[in-house]
Image (cartoon, rainbow, N blue to C red):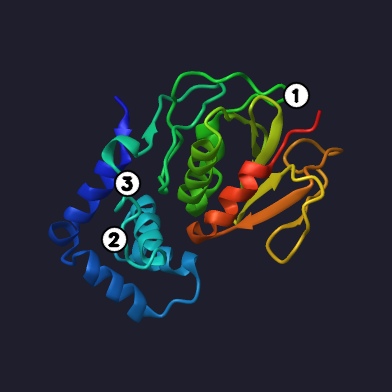
């Protein structure tokens, strides 16, 4: 049975007071009062308070979101759901809010035409660690902008095409890197020059790159860039 992460978040928040002695607002105040400089420090602090890693990471994300639940404005039917583990292309359902686990499977889209490495999308997303909810948000937002997009796990990235590859999401526990084919679009402090590899292969490059560490970066400009990206050939 698929897991509704909107309901899961609501149950988590509703049970905070009973299970921990503090409600969401009190935990937000406690995290702020702790004055921890880094997000991983907050997660470690919460784990010492008795939270499992996944719940500590979720609570830290809510704090980083201004104390607002990730799914506060997401209708139940739009919340992502976790599919069974499988080794295949897994398209992601449209959503505008971060989810904490893997993208859900709507009807299969056309496979990405570029060469790929066999891989498990769920296992690959797990490598993002605390950035897994952000990776889910990025994929869901791309799917909402380009409904025909399909996703395929590679060794350390997710190739994105419709069907030609126009983007690749590099996965790591330190940051996410969204490589985009933007042609002659100008570079700036946010839109950087693509790196060799670019999620495709050692000798290949997608022209531009966004380094992502915060859900607030998935903004209207992000949407515009995704819409502009175009596969070569």
Between circles 3 and 2, the one closer to the viewer is 3
Q: Residue 203 occupies which quadrant of the picture?
A: top right
Task: Identify the residue at image location x=57%, y=23%.
Answer: 89
Label 3: element kind: loop
Does 73 sit left or right of 117 as displayed? left
Q: x%, y% of residue 6?
A: 29, 43
216 or 53: nearer the viewer? 216
Does 102 sit left or right of 183 as displayed? left
User: Which residue lies under the disc numbered 3?
Assistant: 74
Task: Identify the residue at image location x=48%, y=64%.
Answer: 40
Label 1: element kind: loop
Between circles 2 and 1, the one closer to the viewer is 1
- Per the rendering, the mark at residue 115 is 1
| Label 1 to label 3: alpha-carbon separation | 35 Å
170 or 55: nearer the viewer? 170
Sequence order check: which comes first, mark 1 or mark 3?
A: 3
Q: x%, y% of residue 127?
A: 56, 44
Sequence order check: which comes first, mark 2 or mark 1?
A: 2
| Label 3 to label 2: alpha-carbon separation | 29 Å
User: Which residue lies under the disc numbered 2?
Assistant: 50
Task: Identify the residue at image location x=79%, y=36%.
Answer: 201
| Label 2 to label 1: alpha-carbon separation | 44 Å
């Amino acid at each position: 049975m698929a897991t509704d992460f909107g309901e899961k978040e609501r149950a988590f928040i509703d049970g905070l007071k009973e299970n921990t002695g503090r409600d969401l607002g009190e935990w937000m105040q406690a995290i702020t009062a702790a004055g921890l400089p880094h997000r991983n420090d907050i997660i470690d602090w919460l784990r010492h308070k008795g939270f499992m890693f996944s719940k500590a990471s979720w609570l830290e994300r809510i704090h980083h979101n201004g104390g607002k639940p990730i799914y506060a404005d997401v209708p139940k039917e739009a919340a992502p759901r976790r599919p069974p583990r499988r080794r295949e292309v897994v398209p992601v359902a449209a959503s505008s809010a971060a989810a904490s686990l893997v993208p859900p499977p709507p009807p299969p889209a056309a496979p990405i035409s570029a060469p790929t490495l066999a891989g498990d999308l769920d296992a690959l997303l797990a490598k993002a660690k605390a950035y897994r909810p952000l990776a889910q948000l990025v994929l869901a937002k791309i799917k909402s902008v380009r409904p025909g997009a399909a996703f395929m796990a590679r060794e350390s990235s997710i190739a994105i095409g419709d069907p030609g590859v126009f983007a690749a999401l590099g996965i790591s526990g330190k940051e996410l890197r969204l490589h985009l084919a933007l042609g002659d679009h100008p570079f700036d402090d946010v839109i950087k020059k693509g790196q060799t590899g670019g999620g495709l292969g050692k000798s290949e490059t997608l022209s531009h790159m966004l380094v992502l560490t915060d859900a607030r970066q998935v903004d209207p400009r992000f949407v515009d860039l995704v819409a502009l990206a175009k596969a070569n050939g």
